[in-house]
Image: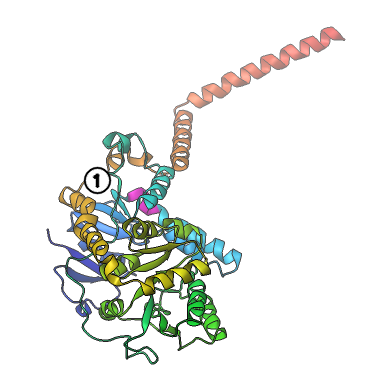
Amino acid sequence: MPTVVAVPNSNVDDIPPNGAEFVHFDLNHQESLAPLVHRSSVCIAQGDITNLYQELGTTSAALVIDGYTPHLAEYLATWQHRPLAEQVSGWQQRLQMLHRQYSVGDFFLCASERQRDWWLGLLEAHGRVNPATLCDDPSLRRLIDVVPYGLHNKPIQHTDNVIRNVWPGIGEDDKVLLWGGGLWPWLDPLTAIQAVANLWIQRQDVRLIFPGTRHPNPLVETMPTHTAAARQLADDLGLTDKAIFFGDWIAYEDWDNVLLESDIALSLHFDTLETRLAFRTRILDYIRAGLPSIVSAGDATAEIIAQRNLGIVTPIADVVAVTRALATLLDAPRSLYTANFAAARAQLTWEVAAEPLVRFCLNPRHAPDKSIMGAQLGNPTQVALAEQLAQARRMIEAYESGKFIRLMRWLDRLRRRFQSASTNDATRTL
């Protein structure tokens, strides 16, 4: 079936063709997306789109909600540096925007079994775990399933130098340690910097690079305080532009070259809610490039590294453990991991990862509870409120038909009898 990718607020002519049709829509005008929705059998949406475009989930197209990113967990971490009142206000807006996607989705995707547990709780809280969905499938896999990031079958290739002999201070024989990704507040670059400082005492050929300290999308808030702390530590240790290097952002077409010019990859984080739910795409990139990795324990991708023996998993914020892990991998030949990476790549392809989504798209359908439960679908509190409103309407109808008046007359007669009996008793007492 043909695939159409709707791209907001950008020039689709700048996107290279890859088998899909790319079209533009305007985020500020709902009508620009409506024709695309009505001509589709399946719509895949993410995050705020379902709130911005109210028609999604109410058309004949089956709606798939992509829950790869735990938006609320990331939002809470991203805004922690702001005043509490501002955090609460933004959190309330975020909850309101996310609420609709829980209610209108026909099929939900997430990146790991951990995330699936999180999503099942969200869906239960919004009334989607109900008799209709459970009778349809007791496992609820037909409601929500795991579709993580996948790997392309095409081998990765080096086409040009991007780091070595390009960044001043990084030569052909240096050992490049790659921090792939941004400096978000749930990540721990300071442990990596301190570990490299420990290594620097013994060997001066290590080069830790942070190629992505600024997000290319101006609408995405960067982390100036987190980036500043990393730069300050490198300065204090006297290692900036010697062992520690900060870049701006790497173009997507250069990313494969960066991976293949690196010797070891790092992904370190703190113990946060984001960590528990994260599925870090950069780890899959490391696997695609056959790049041994040092990662903090605690997230789903650390389990992949450990189970498949693709590097070393260290305790969270443990400088000594990261230092030892770096020394071990620097001295180990890459050939030790060749077979492990080959096996991992064969099992983590897009064909395997996307199978639940492909299966749904081949036989799209609306979720059974949306058609069976109708207006009662949603948050139980809202359902209870709807029932209270229905009772109020029945009382009004009874009033209008005269039943309410007759009831009030009967209650009035009963009140008078009670008052008369009380008066007689008082007279006899006197």
Residue furthest top as drawn: 428
Residue located 21% across and 73% down the image: 156
Residue 183 percent across, percent down from the top left: 45, 74
- Does dot 1 land on a helix, a strand or a loop? loop
Residue furthest left as drawn: 1
Three-letter amino acid code at the position of disc 1: His
Q: Residue tagged by mark 1? A: 366
Q: Is residue 256 above or below residue 351?
A: below
- Please state which of residues 225 and 322 is positioned toward the viewer in this rendering: 322
Whether 229 is among the magenta residues is: no
State which quarter of the image contains the C terminus. top right
Residue 257 percent across, percent down from the top left: 27, 80
Viewer can see residue 60: no
Q: Residues within 10 Å of mark 1 (few under 14, many from 20)?
A: many
Residue 325 percent across, percent down from the top left: 43, 68
Q: Is residue 356 left or right of residue 422?
A: left
Whether 103 is among the magenta residues is: yes
- Main SS of the magenta part reads helix
Viewer can see residue 14: yes
Residue located 46% across and 28% down the image: 398
Q: Quadrant of residue 84?
A: bottom right
State which quarter of the image contains the N terminus. bottom left
Q: Is residue 192 left or right of residue 130?
A: right
Q: Is residue 17 left or right of residue 102?
A: left
- Magenta residues span 100-104
